[in-house]
Amino acid sequence: MSLDNQQQERRRPDWAALAIAALLMVVSVVIAWSTASHGAGASYARVGPTTFPYVIAVAFFGLSIWTVFEAFRGDFPAREKQEISPILWIIGGLAAQMLLLKAAGFSIATGLLFAATARAFGRGPLWKTIPIGIVLSFVVWIIFAKGLQLSLPAGPLEHLLF
Amino acid sequence: MDTFGLLAQGLLTALEPMNMLYALIGVTLGTAVGVLPGIGPALTVALLLPVTYKLDPAGSLIMFAGIYYGGMYGGSTTSILLNTPGESASIVTALEGNKMARAGRGGPALATAAIGSFVAGLIATIGLAFIAPTVVKMALSFGPAEYFALMILAFMTVSAAFGDSTLRGLTALFIGLALGLIGIDLQTGQARLAFGIPDLLDGVEVTTLAVALFAVGEAMSVAASKGGDSTIQAIKGSVWMTREDWSRSWKPWLRGTAIGFPIGAMPAGGAEIGTFLSYSVEKNLAKKPEEFGHGAIEGVAGPEAANNASAAGTLVPLLTLGLPTTATAAIMLAGFQQFGLQPGPLLFATNPQLVWGLIASLLVANLMLLVLNLPLIGVWVRLLTIPLPWLYAGILLFATLGTIGANPSTFELGMLLAFGLLGYGLRRFGYPIAPVVVGLILGPMAEQQLRRALAISQGDPSILLGSPIAVILLLLAATAVLLPLYLRARGRGKVLAQLGANED
């Protein structure tokens, strides 16, 4: 994959890679800052609970600089064009499940996720896939919550039948 | 007691009906996930962790090992018939196997893969049984400094040595290490990187991270890229191998085993490496090298044997040292910990029944897999016809089920979503996934060993270089980082990129 890049001899910096470098830098600072601000006073051991976080913060700092170099040299693999809308559907499905899980119960929340994922892969329409998802999730709920005693939140649908 | 006695006793444990049932469930699930593109053994074990919480430890671990072995079998089916490797260790199989299928020789290709996997699994599992006691004896003399050095070596080989970029491998590793810091420090009880959020005090759940990276990230990545459609090759002609097929297959099986097992057993990570080596060896030794690239049976037999042998090999460091070198092994380690067991030399002394039962059950599982994969191959092929929308919708259903089962909280699902986006980002920019998972699990253990070593020496860091073993291990770790950098700088990186350890 990386060979294509070298052949292209790109002069322009890879902006996405530079953004990653910036992100790594932010992580480095956040780890260092969080560790410093929670400093637990003096410790007997020279290597205490703060040593590892500092080492990792320094490592992120170094990786960030290294990434900047590779970004300018165009060392990152070429990326295919991506469609954004399928990702948004999946994110939406997960978010819906997350927010509805407590209120609507496992089956309804997960049914929505199921339908949204199918939609992300181009299968619809939602009025058909949502009921399919809910029924499927309900069967899964019966097997795992009743059969294997896994604690899956129950909602109106589950209470109706159990 | 000698190894045979222990193994025989283990066999008694393995042949208990309940354990047989667990093994059967494991290999069936394993084959299924191996066949299905998009999910691998690492994800499946992660999903099952919360489900098995209330089950018997020995049975659950037998099931996990069955999934691992099964995944290696099943992956070959997908590679051969679909040209889309079901898991990363089967990439090479697709090279020759799919060509054979296109030429109407899919049956023999599947057969040599399955029988080769069986032969390799059998020999390598017996190898595991014989090597494990020796490694355990050696490991008993290891102190914290040696363990720390060993973990550093594992970190470096998993992240930096293979794959197409040292930088991206190391970055992935440090992301895992940073995530491993989150939560309460084991030795002082101090909260680290929790940002005052109570949910973070327990640290990042392995299940959540693995499920998010492997299932959610993968689903987003596949949905967004809309890759080209691949067609399933119907199995035409005889499933049985001809006399010529047999005579061309048995040597590659044995050579593949001899290559795969040591590579899996060393803390070098990844079953893929062995498959690539085996492929090039077979290509060089073949009597008809011109057939390579057009469906040479050796190119299926060797790599398939190698990937199963290295799966068994991976269990050597996992069981004897508590050292995971692949994502699946890392999650299996989490499985041990869930039951309050710590793999390592002591487990052989304190819980021999479990360890030897597990090893013996692998022999049983291997036999089951041969039956599942040869006569029943048609059933698995049908799995390949599941349309992608339903497949991934189902994967996400079960992925979130695992997370909710472990911890039914909104926050946990939020983390799942966040890590899922991380996983998509990693894939998008060519970062490997396995080092993140290994870093999360092994990071806190490495830190503990380091601090223990320094506590023994009262803060004198020279203890880390105090024994020849530790020095050698650290030198190997340094080589694992520096040599690939040198090779890539000299333009030899292509070979390493091919050897890239990816997922399972």
Image (tube, helix red, strand yellow):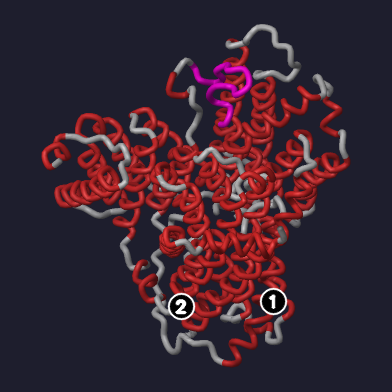
Residue located at (70% from left, 50% from top): B267
Q: Who is closer to the viewer here, B76 or B161? A: B76
Determine whether the residue tagged by mark 1 lies in a helix, strand or loop: helix
Q: Is residue B236 visible?
A: yes
Q: Choose top left, top right, bottom left or bottom right for residue B260.
A: bottom right
**Where does the image place residue A89, in percent across and percent down from the top left?**
30, 42
Q: Who is closer to the viewer here, B128 or A53? A: B128
Query: Disc 1 designates what residue?
Result: B283
- Identify the magenta region: B180-195
Q: Three-letter amino acid code at disc 2? A: Leu
Main SS of residues in magenta: loop
Determine whether the residue tagged by mark 2 lies in a helix, strand or loop: loop
Residue located at (44% from left, 49% from top): B218
Q: Three-letter amino acid code at disc 1? A: Lys
Residue furthest to the bottom in view is B243
Instruction: Judge left or right: residue B280 versus residue B43.
Output: right
Q: Is residue A9 visible?
A: no
| Numbered disc in front, either 1 or 2 | 2
Residue located at (50% from left, 45% from top): B428
**Where does the image place residue B135, in percent across and percent down from the top left?**
75, 52
Where's the N terminus of chain B, which quadrant?
A: bottom right
